[in-house]
């Protein structure tokens, strides 16, 4: 027999309905809140209270600190929303949450590393279960590095999203429900065409809604984000690409590398970098330049290019016109 909804369940339904009406997806939030409700029911709590919340937090002790804090914040935001109509409901004290630790800085992949990455992809072993594994991984690395795609955007691409004639990708309803078209470089277009030719030679589904990165093991379905992350880490280890501190790049680090690479090209071409930034923001699918600024780390190569630009334009003012 189904259990009647608890007061917390009803609050969760109202909360999700409210934010989805405003355009938010809230998939992760729903998973977290549903798990909290199940946990409280299993431990004899009829609603969210201080003892129940503390018991749930103790059960998160094996989870990474940043993940703990994010889940606690999700619950806290629900409680504040609920407090609008239920003034006496429990609201956790944020000052007692797990402290947030800073993210590891990105490992910037240089252009000289791309050849090693692609060679590592080519060395992957194709199997009867995954005959396209080397080619699939190669085109994925090219798209991540040359187009700055998010991991989710990459694994959600379908055949209909690829216009190989015009060399354009359609990114459908990504972050904040934004869709966009992403033009590809000539080299990236050539890689996509080679991959598509190989894909047609296999038994993979070629319907328009079939995933671009097809994984035979999953029943001709596409890769999940976690599944692709595992493949990506394998390639980085094989290629021997590491940062100065010995860490291997993450998938997101290629998006950082793309943004910094764009700035480097503009500096070296003598372009107006400030005027180009809105275009970079639009290309990456950001709502503002402030979001793009998160990816623009100050690297030695970027500092050198900016210094050379400044010297070329204003060096004479510093040395009194002797240069």
Image (cartoon, rainbow, N blue to C red):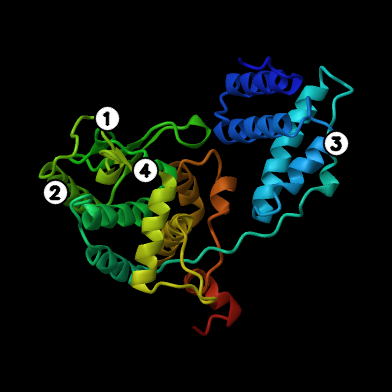
Which quarter of the picture shows residue 16? Answer: top right
| Left or right of 46 on screen, residue 141 | left
Estimate the spatial distance between the alpha carbons at disc 1 and disc 4, rounded to whole Å.
Answer: 13 Å
Residue 198 marker: 2
Lateral position of residue 253 relative to residue 43, left or right? left
Q: CA distance from mark 2 to mark 3?
A: 58 Å
Q: Position of residue 43 (x, y in %)?
A: 74, 34
Q: Which mark is residue 209?
A: 1
The count of marks equals 4
Which quadrant is the N terminus positioned in? top right
Q: Residue at x 49, y 83 (%)?
A: 323
Q: Which residue is farthest front?
A: 1
Check whether the beta carbons of the residues at disc 4 and disc 3 lie within 8 A of each other: no
Give the x, y percent position of residue 261: 42, 61
Q: CA distance from mark 4 to mark 3?
A: 40 Å
Instruction: Point out which mark residue 238 bears.
Output: none
Determine crowd level at label 4: few under 14, some 14-19, many 20+ residues with C-alpha closer than 10 A. Answer: many
CA neighbours of label 1 inside 10 A, class few (<14), some (14 to 19), many (20+) = few
Up-down relation of residue 236 to residue 258 (above or below)? below
Under circle 1, the secondary element is loop
Tell me: 304 left or right of 72. left
Q: Label 3 belongs to which residue?
A: 50
Q: Are marks 1 and 3 in contact (CB under 8 Å)?
A: no
- Quote the CA–CA distance across marks 2 and 4: 18 Å
- Label 2 sits on a secondary structure element that is helix
Mark 3, other Cα within 10 Å: few <14 / some 14–19 / many ≥20: few
Q: Which mark is residue 155?
A: 4
Q: CA distance from mark 1 to mark 3?
A: 47 Å
């Amino acid at each position: 027999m189904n259990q009647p909804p608890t007061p917390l369940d009803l609050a969760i339904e109202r909360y999700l309905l409210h934010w989805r009406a405003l355009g938010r997806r809230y998939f992760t939030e729903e998973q977290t809140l549903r798990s909290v409700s199940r946990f409280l029911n299993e431990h004899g709590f009829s609603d969210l209270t201080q003892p129940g919340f503390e018991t749930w937090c103790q059960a998160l002790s094996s989870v990474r600190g940043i993940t703990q804090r994010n889940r606690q914040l999700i619950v806290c935001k629900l409680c504040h929303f609920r407090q609008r109509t239920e003034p006496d409901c429990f609201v956790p004290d944020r000052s007692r949450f797990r402290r947030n630790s800073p993210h590891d800085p990105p490992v910037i992949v240089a252009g000289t590393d791309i050849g090693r990455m692609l060679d590592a992809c080519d060395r992957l072993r194709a199997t009867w279960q995954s005959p396209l594994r080397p080619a699939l991984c190669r085109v994925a690395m090219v798209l991540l590095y040359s187009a700055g795609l998010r991991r989710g955007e990459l694994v959600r691409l379908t055949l209909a999203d690829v216009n190989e004639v015009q060399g354009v990708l359609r990114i459908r309803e990504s972050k904040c429900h934004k869709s966009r078209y992403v033009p590809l470089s000539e080299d990236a277009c050539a890689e996509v065409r080679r991959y598509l030719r190989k894909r047609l030679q296999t038994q993979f589904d070629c319907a328009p809604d079939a995933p671009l990165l097809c994984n035979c093991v999953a029943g001709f379905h596409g890769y999940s984000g976690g599944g692709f992350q595992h493949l990506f880490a394998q390639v980085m280890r094989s290629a021997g690409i590491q940062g100065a501190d010995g860490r291997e790049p993450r998938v997101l680090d290629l998006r950082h590398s793309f943004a910094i690479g764009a700035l480097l090209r503009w500096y070296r071409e003598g372009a107006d970098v400030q005027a180009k930034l809105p275009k970079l923001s639009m290309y990456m699918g950001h709502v503002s330049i402030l979001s793009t600024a998160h990816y623009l780390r100050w690297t030695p190569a970027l500092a050198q290019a900016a210094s050379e630009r400044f010297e070329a334009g204003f060096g004479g003012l510093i040395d009194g016109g002797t240069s």
